[in-house]
Amino acid sequence: MPSDTLIAAALRDGLAQPAERVLAVGAHPDDIELGCGGILALLAQKRIHVAALVVTDGAGNGRQPAVRYAESQRAARMLGVSELRFGHVRDGRAAEESRLVHVLDRCIRVSRPTFVLTHAITLHEHNDHTAVAAATRTACTKFGIPMLGYEGPTYPLAGDFVPTVFVDIGAVWPTKRRAILAHVSEVRRGSISLDHARCRAQHRAAQAGWDSALAEALQVNSKNGQLTHEQSFLEALSIQFQVSEWQQGHTGVGAQ
Ligand SMILES: [Zn+2]
């Protein structure tokens, strides 16, 4: 893939618009940290307002919501998330939850994001992820907010996730690592694995042509499948990212 990619932006620090506000949406406590924790840490370092919404209570298979909420709060602080919200939807029931769209709707009205990250719409990692991705897309479409989808690195590589954007998270890997490990109860259960997260980050960086780097990958989530407003927004965020040429449909934009 290296020859199929191009550096779309490697913008200098200080170009980000302080008015930008990012919202990350995850079905369960830990999904956000695993899927886009590095990106959130980068954004927070650049003083961009970062909010997170954990939709369900994470109570599946006898887990304790209070424990999981506390772990989410610790992880969010580590990443620099300044606003953490909980949807209190029952774990495993997101698809049947009639309040789901309302939860997303309300969060967007209160947090006023200009950009949203959530589960990739085409992935079928978990029913809750699929339901949350669909509800988030509905809400973002309604409010006209650009969005991108992340993957769950503890799930097997899936062909239905087509990365479009790669973000170098090497500089903030220690932060992401700590945020993942903040989910102590999940680490103890063996439900999340730091090794899987790191291996996936290495794989995505290699796909982007970045040797000895770590990356998070994002996919277009909008109904038209185009990377239009999303790329403009990423450029404004002043983070180093790379866009797949074969997705973007043009060549020669920028260089590091
Ligand atoms: Zn999950």
Image (cartoon, rainbow, N blue to C red):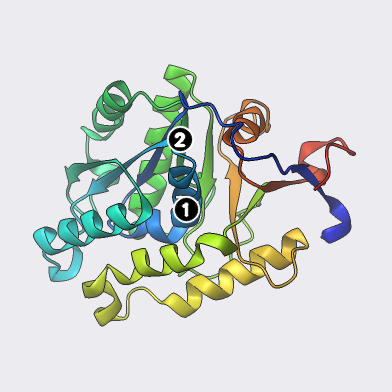
> Does mark 1's beta carbon lie closer than 8 Å to ligand 1?
no
Q: Is residue 205 above or below residue 137?
A: below
Of residues 249 and 47, which is closer to you in this image?
A: 47
Instruction: Please count the marks in the image.
Output: 2
Could you tell me residue 92's position as x and y percent? Answer: 24, 55
Could you tell me residue 158's position as x and y percent? Answer: 59, 63
Disc ID at residue 36: 1
- Identity, as a three-letter code, of the amino acid under mark 1: Cys
In the picture as drawn, the residue positioned furthest to the front comes out as 14
Q: Is residue 39 above or below residue 144?
A: below
Task: Give the quadrant of the N terminus.
Answer: bottom right
Residue at position x 35%, y 63% in the image: 179
Specify which label sits upstream in the sequence, 1 or 2.
Answer: 1
Examine the rendering and report whether any part of residue 124 can be seen. no
Question: In the rendered image, which quarter is residue 175 located in?
Answer: bottom left
Question: In the rendered image, which quarter is residue 222 located in?
Answer: top right
Determine which residue is flagged by label 2. Answer: 116
Q: Residues within 10 Å of mark 1 (few under 14, many from 20)?
A: many
Could you tell me residue 186's position as x and y percent? Answer: 26, 73
Q: Residues within 10 Å of mark 2 (few under 14, many from 20)?
A: many
- Identity, as a three-letter code, of the amino acid under mark 2: Val
Of residues 237 and 158, which is closer to you in this image?
A: 237
Of residues 66 and 139, which is closer to you in this image?
A: 66
Residue at position x 30%, y 25% in the image: 105
Of residues 227 and 51, which is closer to you in this image?
A: 51
Q: State if disc 2 and disc 1 touch (CB < 8 Å).
A: no
Q: Is residue 97 left or right of residue 122?
A: left
Q: Is residue 107 left or right of residue 14?
A: left
* Distance between mark 1 and mark 2 Cα atoms: 11 Å
SS type, badge 2: strand
Q: Is residue 184 left or right of residue 113?
A: left
